[in-house]
Image (tube, helix red, strand yellow):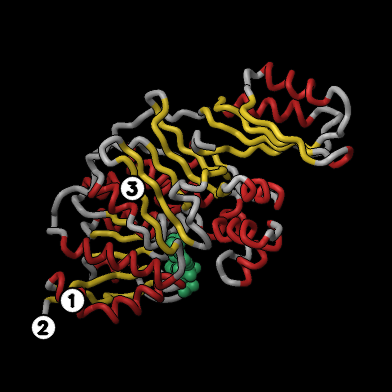
Amino acid sequence: MPEACRIGLLGHGTVGGAFARLLHERADAVALTTGRRPELAGVLRRGSGDFDAILADSEIVVELIGGLDPARDYVSRALSAGRHVVTANKQLLAEHGQELAAVAREHRVQLRFEAAVGGVVPVIRVLQESLAAAHVERLHGIVNGTTNFILTRMAERGASYGDALAEAQALGYAEADPTDDVTGKDAAAKMAILARLAFDTPVRLDEVRYEGIEHLTADDMQYARELGLGLKLIGTAERVDGGLSVRVHPAFLYGAHPLASIHGPFNAVTIESEAITEVTLSGPGAGGPQTASAVLGDVVTAMRAAPGGAPTGPPPRPLPIVADVESAFYLHVDVADRPGVLAQLAQILGLQGISVKSFVQRGMGADARLTMVLHPVLESKVGVAVDLIAGLDVVRARPRAIRVIDEEF
Ligand SMILES: NC(=O)c1ccc[n+]([C@@H]2O[C@H](COP(=O)([O-])OP(=O)(O)OC[C@H]3O[C@@H](n4cnc5c(N)ncnc54)[C@H](OP(=O)(O)O)[C@@H]3O)[C@@H](O)[C@H]2O)c1
């Protein structure tokens, strides 16, 4: 009989319950590859279990409670007690990842969190291990399956945002309160985690600028379809002028971009660097069994780690965070079809130093819509131009400005 490896499980909900089942099913297979058989030392729930007793009896602690409190305290105490910790808690890592990584380093134990970003997609492991020496230039990610499902439905079926959201909720891809997903906040937390790993830079959540998908319309989708583009919620982390920019926003992607073909609730991350050119990883973004599988993968890795082994990562060499970056934009303006409208728009754009790459007018009279693609320009300048254009009395609704990724557009 192989020696046992005792696992303390904190949380037994969607992921925790699936993890407990998977651990039971796969224990023999794990024993074959690691030489030790994992078994549950105890389970903590709101009304049952005792953290101190579970900690005392386990070698590895798996945190699947979620949120900041009490997860932060439990994870910190487990690391300080010399236990490897595996968690799927993106909120905890986005807010306190740096501090917890330091505790793990100090106590020479592993803090593993593959399931916190990208579901089953092994992006954390690839950044920490396979590409540890790659000097990453840029990451683009579809890291929220809910919004990707909604945008896919809008693109494929011409559904409105509201109808696509309702379908996502009915199918269990969106929560009853979808705010964190649709506003981009969830994706921002995940990008903060990825950016910290890829660029050795602590990124606070409030340093990630994010926009959601709530304002996107069937018109935007129609425009994307006509030009063979994808419209996705994209997280970006990239080196800019010696600093680091991390942001989340809807963006048009040219059809051949690796992320343009990621549909439904899937996640994907594209990693770019001079050494590797480009690597794209994709797979299911969430779900109890899928997330539990990523958690068990981390547990197996932790089981293989020698006790008191190598620290989990280098101390950070932080880059300064850059708030304002250049981007190409698509701009959509609903206007009254009156003489002089174009001149007014041109004057506002010109004053911000914005130049127009292409321009189309659709509809006539009260239905006139202008769509244009802007050459790359600082985002702040587009923001000012949108505010000024929105204030014109010939403009019928606030203009929509959507980023465009790639020059091929
Ligand atoms: N669901 C997904 O598809 C998914 C995907 C990726 C990552 N994650 C992450 O995985 C983690 C768990 O998510 P989940 O969906 O499994 O959550 P969940 O279904 O709400 O389960 C949470 C579990 O934690 C327990 N718990 C809550 N507060 C506690 C407290 N104060 N003390 C002790 N136990 C407490 C709950 O106890 P009771 O059983 O007594 O209620 C429950 O068993 C989160 O960090 C989430 O972000 C989830």
- Depth check, mark 3 against mark 1: the one in front is 3
Give the residue displayed 64% in from the left and 48% down from the top: 226
Please state which of residues 125 and 52 is positioned toward the viewer in this rendering. 125
User: How many residues crowd around disc 2 within 10 Å: few (fewer than 14), some, or many (20 or more)?
Assistant: few
Residue 364 in picture, x, y percent from top left: 85, 39
Are the two marked residues, 1 and 2, in contact with CB atoms closer than 8 angstroms? yes
Residue at numbered disc 2: 1
Taking 382 as reference, is 60 above or below it? below
Q: Is label 3 in a helix, a strand or a loop? A: strand
Q: Is mark 2 within 8 Å of ligand 1?
A: no
Residue 204, located in which quarter of the rendered image?
top left
Residue at numbered disc 1: 37
- Measure how far apart labels 3 and 1 are at the Cα level: 34 Å
User: How many residues crowd around disc 1 within 10 Å: few (fewer than 14), some, or many (20 or more)?
Assistant: many
Q: Amino acid at mark 3?
A: Val
On the question of residue 71 being in view, the answer is no
Q: Amino acid at mark 2?
A: Met
Q: Is label 2 in a helix, a strand or a loop? A: loop
User: How many residues crowd around disc 3 within 10 Å: few (fewer than 14), some, or many (20 or more)?
Assistant: some
Residue at numbered disc 3: 279
Residue 38 placement, left or right of 189: left
Upstream in sequence: badge 1 or badge 2: 2
Please state which of residues 325 and 153 is positioned toward the viewer in this rendering. 153
Give the residue displayed 15% in from the left and 71% down from the top: 33
